[in-house]
Amino acid sequence: MLDGAPEPSATTYLAPGQLVATAEPRTLRTVLGSCVSVCLYDPLLRIGGMNHFLLPGTGTSGEPSSRYGEHAMATLWNEVVALGAASSGLRAYVYGGARVLAGVSDLMHLGQRNVECALAWLAERRVPIDDRNVLGTRARRLEFRVSDGVATLRILGGP
């Protein structure tokens, strides 16, 4: 850009099962229904990332996959720390887990199970949660700016 104006940060879209960790001033964007995204952020070093997982737990195939919450959480943590973030200084943001299918019973509420997976994982590691917007019945569009740790959420659809 001209005259020393800062360049706008690049934007990366995360599809289900993906995650990104970066120390660059990047905006991470995704759309969530019953899936959950967790953003981990080191506010001192401005290092952060986001995952987007579809299912709680670890899966049954034996192959680790970021489609599952346990692997998506551990991988995001490891990648953010590998970039230099202090594990003791990480902050978390948790979003998603909607019940987008109206006829689903409480036992089959995948979104709620995804949220519980993320919250339990973070609680085990004593990671403070600075923001959360979970459950409900509507999808969300999430943007997370790594440059300043700001998450912007927009509820989609409905009246």
Image: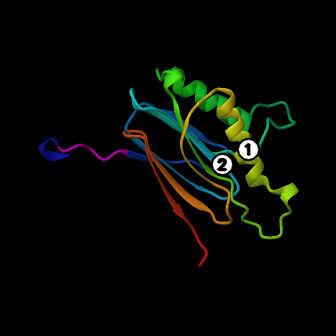
Q: Position of residue 114 (x, y in %)?
A: 73, 47
Q: Position of residue 78 (x, y in %)?
A: 59, 24
Residue 50 occupies quadrant: top right
Name the spot of residue 131 as percent of width and height, x first.
Answer: 53, 46
SS label for mark 1 = helix
Label 1: few (<14), some or many (≥20) within 10 Å?
some
- The overriding secondary structure of the stretch rendered in magenta is loop
Question: In whole angstroms, how far apart are the C-alphas of marks 2 and 1?
Answer: 10 Å
- Left or right: 104 in relation to 41: right
Q: Which residues are magenta?
A: 5-9
Proximity of marks 2 and 1: CB atoms separated by less than 8 Å = no
Query: According to the image, label 2 marks what residue?
Result: 36
Q: What residue is rendered at 70% in x and 56% in y?
A: 34
**Is residue 120 rendered to the left or right of residue 103?**
left
How many numbered badges does the structure rendering display?
Answer: 2
- In the image shown, does 153 or 68 lie closer to the viewer? 153
Left of 91 or right of it: where is 26? Answer: left
- Let me know if residue 65 appears in the view: no
- Residue type highlighted by circle 1: Glu
Q: Position of residue 113 (x, y in %)?
A: 77, 48
Residue 24, magenta (yes or no): no
| Residue positioned 53% across, 22% down in the render | 88
Is residue 150 placed above or below 135 in the rendered structure? above
Which residue is denoted by mark 1 in the rendering?
116
